[in-house]
Amino acid sequence: MISFRGLVLWHLAVLVVLPVSARAQARGVPAGESLIRLGPLALHPRLSLTNLGVDTNVHNAQERPERDLTATLVPGVDSRLRVGRAMATAKTSVEIVHFHRARALRSVAFSQEGRFEAQLARLTPFVAGGHTSTYQRLNLEIDERIDQTRDSVGGGLTVRLGARVSLSGAREQQRLRFGIETSPGIAAA
């Protein structure tokens, strides 16, 4: 069991460490700042700890709310591969949600996003896609946690009009599915 003093010290440590990590992530992955370089491949691993604290009503119940200690750990990696005038970028994340007592609310989510672009003379066509699978509340209005899968695909074009001016157009399509999909002959648990 974690003491109140230990919990306060843990929160203070997180408040000191996370802003530095957040500033580094907000800048993206410039080539000179990648932690791992393998020729044209640049990798930038990241790790964040969010939602650390006590949830005073884990089930959003009106009567007899339950308190629980919760934390979310999000490891991931940003990657970039440049080949000539083309560049492929990807962002991979795993979100591990932990509740100390409410074991049914624990979950692991996976997210993968990718983009490929080719820089031509004044044109830069690109295609992008992503996949996310999670077990969370859909929004603040729905209390039930459900399996969700979101797939997206899109593309577009950027036209450079001058040294500092460009015009971009893009189209994206998303598909959101709920529940557990099973293959024939496999029963859902």
Image (cartoon, rainbow, N blue to C red):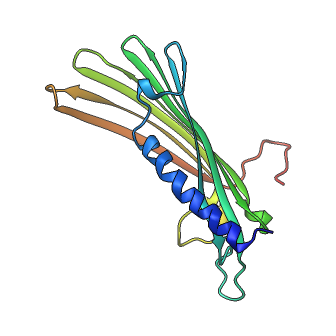
Find residue 9 and report its horizontal and vertical position in percent. Answer: 63, 64
Locate residue 1, reporting x and y percent. 81, 69
Q: In the rendered view, would you say 18 is above or below 104?
A: above
Q: Would residue 18 be found to the left or right of residue 160 on screen?
A: right
Report the side of 150 relative to 144 (left or right): left
User: Outermost residue toward the bottom?
Assistant: 63
Please name the residue shown 70% across and 67% down the image: 6
Quarter of the image where one finds residue 54: bottom right
**Quick check: 4 above or below 96?**
below
> Is 187 placed left or right of 108 in the picture?
right
> Is residue 147 in view?
no
Quadrant position of residue 163:
top left
At 59% across and 39% down in the image, what residue appears? 76
Please provide percent x and percent y for residue 127: 42, 29
Which residue is at the front of the view, 56 or 12? Answer: 12
Q: Position of residue 117 (x, y in %)?
A: 39, 23
The quarter of the picture where residue 135 lies is: bottom right
Residue 63 appearing in the image: yes
Question: Is residue 168 positioned above or below 148 on the image?
Answer: above
Write the residue at 79% across / 64% down.
103
